[in-house]
């Protein structure tokens, strides 16, 4: 297969080892930070919604803190955030480079966006449903899990898809500050060395990843929407 | 028994405050269908939400079977709420769950076995006549079917009380009838106390035993539905009654000086209201015979409310004024309410 590829992508074959490694790194960054960001974002988003005024765990302080933290982190461009975070990253992950060093900033870059998406998804649940559940004597925790989260699965699947695709973009940006992955690979060879074949192949690989994410997302949305 | 004592609730915003419920005291007996009617903004929805503490009243007590709901902690309140079912104008079904799962929803996570839950849910499905929709999702149902699911769900924990918040307001007239029949049926069958909030007088007329009329947060009139229809006291009550009665047409005709209601001296245009027994007597022919007067009927209406007949006649009474006077006295003596609508 390498021979076949060599005819129209000679540079890619030359750096084949680095190429496969960078795909692997991208996938690692994507999955590790994605899973952590999903859990943290879901927790924060849910906490944000239920602490709103008039809701089941109304708490102005917590709500205010989450709101402001999201706004602050969302307003910092990711490329600056990742650079500014280096000392903190070193403290938490032990290193600021490579896949390991990229995960913390990626989570931080992704969580505020996802938290807002979760907020939107859960807030679109009709208040009447919450009221109905309360009238049945369902506990606040029951309302969170059995009404809020269960009812917004399609919306959450949509938010997760959007966030996952933007996270994939962020992993490439991490390449600029030593995170490795496809972003770094393209920067090094496709951009600095003008190897167009590398550039094009990497774009196609990214495109395929995005399509797969979108396909899975659509599938979940379709299966859970009634 | 539900007792409300001096209940008040104010909603405050930065600029203003709205007194949604003002000093409401009333008692709802076990097993009765109690209606609360009022225009939107009258405070009836707030009032019904106080009954299960979805809204906490500022002052006053809600006492259900001797328990002060205001004094309960969250946990005991949740337990009490299980015995107070509630249905809503917009049904509030869980869209991600099937009809069966919606009905089973309140039963789960309280230590009941799967078998018990399945049996209860199936019985409720049968009760509301939706066996064939068991595995449908709410989005596949009509409004009436959705409300049936909501009713079944509200009955899952064998409540003693069912609160209906504008439960038929989003439904067409035929569907409203069938839902009202269902409510009446479960009221009898399960000896369930039903509290109905509505702005439609026909809902009150069709199934309620007693009704409270609300205006600006206050109960302005409260009585048995039959009595309210026979002798409404407040202007707002008369307004509500006119929405379900063609009688209000008469007033318009008089105002328009229509030919059908035109009279000349010494004629009088009378409205005669009678109820129950007096409807069976040949009143009109009696006053012609005894007092040498004639009464030509220009309008007649009969309502049957809670098995009581309420009749109304609009007649033009003619004859010697003194005779007319005696005829009216005779009518009065026979428990017929006489109102002179117009005289020449």
Image (tube, coloured by chain):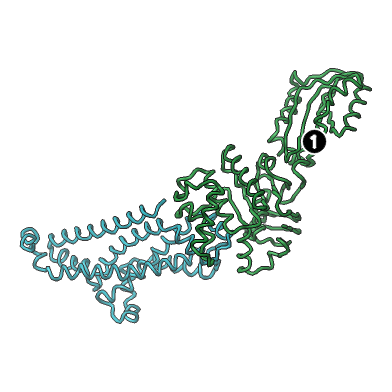
Query: In the figure, is residue B331 to the left or right of B70?
Result: right
Location of the C terminus of chain B (image quadrant):
top right
Compare residues A79 and B329 and report the one nearer the observer. B329
- Look at the picture and state if B136 lies above or below A159: above
Residue A23, image quadrant: bottom left
Residue B129: in sight, yes or no? yes
Chain identifier of the green chain: B
- Look at the picture and state if B7 lies above or below A107: above
Compare residues A204 and A134 and report the one nearer the observer. A134
- Look at the picture and state if B101 lies above or below A178: above
Compare residues A111 and B99 and report the one nearer the observer. B99
Location of the N terminus of chain B (image quadrant):
bottom right
Query: In the figure, is residue B212 to the left or right of B126?
Result: right
Which residue is at a point 52% across and 61% down the rendered structure image? B116
Q: Position of residue A44 (x, y in %)?
A: 44, 68
- Colour of chain A as rendered: cyan
Give the total of numbered labels. Answer: 1
Query: In the figure, is residue A141 to the left or right of B229?
Result: left
Q: Position of residue A95 (x, y in %)?
A: 28, 80
Q: Which residue is mark 1?
A: B276
Q: Secondary structure at mark 1?
A: helix
Which residue is at a point 69% across and 40% down the rendered structure image? B205
Q: Position of residue B127 (x, y in %)?
A: 56, 49
Residue B344: in sight, yes or no? no
Which residue is at a point 68% across and 57% down the rendered structure image? B10
Instruction: Work out which residue is located at the far right of the displayed protein and give it.
Output: B322
Q: Chain of mark 1?
A: B
Q: Position of residue A185 (x, y in %)?
A: 18, 68
10 Å crowding of disc 1: few (<14), some (14-19), many (20+): few
């Amino acid at each position: 297969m390498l021979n076949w590829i060599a005819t129209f992508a000679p540079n890619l074959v030359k750096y084949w080892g680095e190429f496969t490694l960078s795909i692997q790194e991208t996938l690692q960054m994507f999955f590790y930070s994605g899973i952590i960001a999903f859990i943290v974002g879901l927790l924060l988003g849910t906490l944000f919604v239920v602490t709103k005024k008039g809701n089941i765990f109304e708490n102005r302080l917590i709500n205010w803190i989450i709101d402001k933290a999201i706004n602050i982190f969302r307003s910092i461009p990711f490329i600056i955030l990742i650079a500014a975070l280096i000392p903190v990253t070193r403290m938490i992950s032990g290193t600021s480079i490579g896949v390991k060093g990229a995960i913390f900033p990626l989570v931080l870059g992704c969580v505020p966006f996802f938290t807002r998406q979760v907020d939107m998804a859960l807030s679109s649940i009709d208040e009447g449903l919450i009221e109905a559940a309360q009238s049945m004597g369902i506990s606040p925790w029951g309302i969170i899990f059995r009404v809020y989260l269960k009812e917004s699965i399609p919306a959450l699947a949509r938010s997760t898809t959007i966030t996952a695709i933007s996270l994939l973009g962020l992993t490439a940006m991490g390449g600029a500050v030593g995170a490795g992955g496809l972003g770094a690979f393209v920067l090094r060879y496709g951009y600095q060395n003008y190897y167009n074949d590398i550039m094009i192949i990497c774009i196609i690989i990214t495109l395929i990843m995005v399509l797969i994410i979108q396909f899975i997302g659509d599938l979940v949305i379709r299966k859970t929407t009634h | 028994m539900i007792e409300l004592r001096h209940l008040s609730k104010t909603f405050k915003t930065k600029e203003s405050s709205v007194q949604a419920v003002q000093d409401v005291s009333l008692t709802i007996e076990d097993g009765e269908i109690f209606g609360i009617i009022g225009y939107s903004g009258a405070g009836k929805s707030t009032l019904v939400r106080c009954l299960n503490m979805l809204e906490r009243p500022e002052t006053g007590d809600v006492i259900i079977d001797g328990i002060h709901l205001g004094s309960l902690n969250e946990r005991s309140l949740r337990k009490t709420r299980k015995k107070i079912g509630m249905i809503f104008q917009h049904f509030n079904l869980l869209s991600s769950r099937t009809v069966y799962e919606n009905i089973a929803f309140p039963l789960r996570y309280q230590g009941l076995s799967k078998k018990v839950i399945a049996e209860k849910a199936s019985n409720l499905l049968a009760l509301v006549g939706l066996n064939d929709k068991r595995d449908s999702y709410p989005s596949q149902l009509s409004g009436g079917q959705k409300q049936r699911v909501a009713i079944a769900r509200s009955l899952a924990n064998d409540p003693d009380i069912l609160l209906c918040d504008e439960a038929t307001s989003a439904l067409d007239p035929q569907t409203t009838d069938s839902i009202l029949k269902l409510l009446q049926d479960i009221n009898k069958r399960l000896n369930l106390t039903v509290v109905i909030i509505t702005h439609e007088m026909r809902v009150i007329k069709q199934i309620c035993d007693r009704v409270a009329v609300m205006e600006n947060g206050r109960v302005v009139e409260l009585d048995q539905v039959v009595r309210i229809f026979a002798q409404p006291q407040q202007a707002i009550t008369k307004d509500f009654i006119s929405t379900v009665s063609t009688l209000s047409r008469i007033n318009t005709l008089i105002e328009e000086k229509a030919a059908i209601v035109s009279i000349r001296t010494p004629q009088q245009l009378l409205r005669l209201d009678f109820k129950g027994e007096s409807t069976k007597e040949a009143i009109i022919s009696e006053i012609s015979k005894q007092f040498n007067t004639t009464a030509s009927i220009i309008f007649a209406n009969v309502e049957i409310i809670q098995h009581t007949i309420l009749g109304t006649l609009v007649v033009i009474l003619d004859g010697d004024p003194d005779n007319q006077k005696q005829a009216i006295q005779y009518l009065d003596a026979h428990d017929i309410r006489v109102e002179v609508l117009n005289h020449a």
